[in-house]
């Protein structure tokens, strides 16, 4: 995995690194010079080093997926056994290759607003199979409908439609269907359905993320790239109190002159929240010294271990009255669907979260998230952002295919790694 020859971002960082060397020799005069140059070049406006790369990233960014193929669907449905999973992957897509759109500078408050269009192109050479590979996975429509409509009378109706469409608790879908959408036979029988198309990332192509409005840094370089508003708002309206705030940048860069003691805040629309990374180690990327920042386990801890997280605990059952760690209920951000985000293989999660799933093997090396940041410019030169998507399934008296379950399941569907590896 490499970057284009013409790596704007890297060029900027190299300049930064070179300046750093000079800075060491010429201090303190050189130090002033560096500060001035950097401050000028990281502003987000036409003509700067940062701007060019910011509009359209010069590096190749990939999203690798691992799908959890269920080995014992009948056994789970009939006997409420543990779910036996086998991960298959990576299946790799190139993402974030489209330029930002509708870029509008606002000189009044020194911000720039834009849309980030979504796109994904399959990369067979970086994948273990094709988009037509089949997987046994949870029936997403059945799980979501049972959760959204708990009313027993409605569930009786749903049950007859599930039965009529020959749907079950699990289903076989191709990679392409699972990720990007398929017409669900059960939803197709629902009168006046909201949608009949289901997929983990449906819709994706031809959609945009945003509008984002970020500070361009012209008045104060310490604010550059920090998000002012997202979709016109400063808060998300998914969480209570400070958990709802949109903090920091989008993690592609941070304000320059990053220090090891800093807590780097960023917002990720994928997980519907702001989060943070802390310094872990010095790393040398082909001669460029960078700081490795990681998402600490504390960020996923239960409110018992980390009281700051109390407002990310939104329900009592799965979280065991907010004593359980490692899963985030984002149903509010997913039209009520019971979607739970965790780290891959439930890394850092409490044992009760993964006790209904066999075949997982969490380890920090493969499953944590890190950002390698060139400290002078604040640019993120290399990263691995990892997360797992899970869906909650509860037993239901009225729905035959969920009737024999004896407990709640947080069913892992897939995990992903969004990466840019530094190798220009
Ligand atoms: C369920 O358990 C029973 C008793 O252990 C066993 O005979 C049966 O084969 C199991 N059913 C499935 C679908 O595995
Ligand atoms: C982006 O700009 C185009 C052309 O000016 C406009 O038609 C479109 O509505 C804008 N999109 C959004 C979401 O503002
Ligand atoms: C999305 O668009 C790309 C080309 O821009 C195409 O290769 C890919 O197949 C599309 N994906 C879906 C799910 O339609
Ligand atoms: C996946 O299953 C479908 C339907 O059974 C089949 O047509 C297709 O060939 C399978 N894909 C692969 C790669 O085996
Ligand atoms: C539908 O219900 C009938 C009668 O209860 C049952 O025999 C049949 O197995 C069910 N079909 C499915 C796909 O569950
Ligand atoms: C956003 O939430 C914070 C923390 O609860 C609050 O202080 C602030 O007033 C809210 N801002 C807006 C614009 O609602
Ligand atoms: C957002 O930033 C404020 C101020 O630094 C902090 O108090 C709050 O906890 C942060 N919220 C999130 C969700 O990171
Ligand atoms: C949660 O707390 C309530 C009240 O304190 C208690 O009745 C309930 O049993 C607790 N539930 C769990 C899952 O611990």
Image (cartoon, helix red, strand yellow):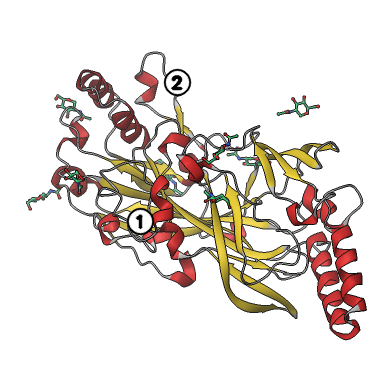
Residue at 70% x, 67% y: name it.
258
- Return the x and y of residue 115 as percentages of the image width and height: 71, 37
Quarter that holds the C terminus: bottom right
162 vs 379: above or below:
above
Seen as rendered, the residue at the extreme bottom is 25
Q: Is 279 on the left-hand or right-hand side of 39?
A: left
Q: Nearer the viewer, residue 319 or 180?
A: 319
Residue that numbered label 2 is attached to:
194
- Residue furthest to the top: 192
Asked where in the image residue 160 lies, by quadrant, the reply is top left
In this view, the residue in front, 126 or 46, is 46
Q: Secondary structure at mark 1?
A: loop
Residue 6 found in image quarter: bottom right
**Image coordinates for residue 39, horizontal then vertical, percent:** 85, 60
Rendered position, 282 above or below 117: below
Mark toward the start of the polypeptide (1 vs 2): 2
Q: Give the percent coordinates (x, y) of residue 280.
A: 56, 74
Name the residue rendered at 84%, 83% in the picture. 24
The image position of residue 118, as x and y in percent, is: 65, 41
Left/right of residue 258 with respect to residue 235 in the rendered view = right
Task: Say the numbered circle drawn on residue 60.
Answer: none
Between 301 and 355, which is closer to the camera in this rendering?
301
4 relative to 421 in the view: left or right: right
Quadrant position of the N terminus in the picture: bottom right
Q: Quadrant of ligand 6?
A: top right
Query: Is residue 282 placed above or below 374 in the rendered structure?
Result: below
**Residue 328 visible from this viewpoint:** no
The residue to which callout 1 is attached is 302
- Cα–Cα span, label 1 and label 2: 35 Å
Residue visible at 52% across and 39% down in the picture: 180
Q: Residues within 10 Å of mark 1 (few under 14, many from 20)?
A: many
Name the residue at 21% across, 34% down. 401
């Amino acid at each position: 995995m490499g970057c284009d020859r013409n790596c704007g971002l890297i060029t900027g960082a190299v300049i930064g690194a070179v300046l750093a060397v000079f800075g060491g020799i010429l201090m303190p005069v050189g130090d002033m010079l560096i500060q001035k140059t950097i401050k000028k070049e990281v502003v987000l406006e036409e003509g700067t080093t940062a701007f060019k790369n910011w509009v359209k990233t010069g590096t190749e960014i990939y999203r690798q997926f691992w799908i959890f193929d269920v080995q014992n669907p009948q056994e789970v449905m009939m006997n409420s056994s543990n779910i036996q999973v086998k991960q298959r992957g990576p299946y790799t897509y190139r993402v974030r290759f489209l330029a930002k759109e509708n870029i509008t500078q606002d000189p009044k408050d020194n911000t720039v607003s834009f849309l980030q269009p979504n796109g994904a192109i399959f990369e067979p050479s970086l994948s273990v199979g094709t988009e037509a590979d089949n997987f046994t996975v949870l029936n997403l429509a059945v799980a979501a409908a049972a959760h959204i409509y708990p009313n027993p009378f409605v569930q009786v109706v749903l049950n007859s439609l599930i039965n009529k469409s020959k749907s079950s608790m699990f289903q076989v879908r191709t990679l392409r269907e699972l990720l990007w959408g398929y017409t669900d036979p059960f939803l197709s029988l629902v009168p006046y359905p909201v949608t009949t198309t289901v997929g983990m990332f449906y819709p994706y192509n031809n959609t945009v993320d945003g509008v984002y409005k970020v500070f361009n840094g012209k008045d104060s370089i310490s604010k550059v790239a920090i998000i002012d508003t997202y979709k016109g708002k400063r808060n998300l309206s998914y969480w209570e109190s400070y958990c709802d705030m949109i903090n920091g940048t989008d993690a592609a860069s941070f304000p320059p002159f990053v220090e090891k003691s800093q807590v780097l805040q960023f917002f990720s629309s994928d997980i519907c929240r702001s989060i943070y990374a802390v310094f872990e180690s010095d790393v040398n990327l082909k001669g460029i010294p960078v700081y490795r920042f990681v998402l600490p386990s504390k960020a996923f801890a239960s409110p018992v271990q980390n009281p700051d997280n109390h407002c990310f605990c939104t329900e009592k059952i799965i979280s065991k009255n907010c004593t359980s760690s490692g899963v985030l209920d984002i149903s509010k951000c997913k039209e009520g669907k019971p979607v739970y985000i965790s780290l891959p293989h439930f890394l850092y999660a409490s044992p009760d979260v993964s006790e209904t799933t066999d075949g997982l093997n969490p380890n920090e090396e493969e499953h944590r998230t890190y950002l390698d940041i060139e400290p002078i410019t604040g640019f993120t030169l290399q990263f691995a952002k990892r997360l797992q998507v899970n869906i909650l399934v509860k037993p239901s008296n009225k729905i035959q295919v969920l009737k024999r379950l004896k407990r709640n399941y947080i069913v892992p569907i897939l995990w992903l790694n969004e990466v840019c590896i530094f190798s220009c």
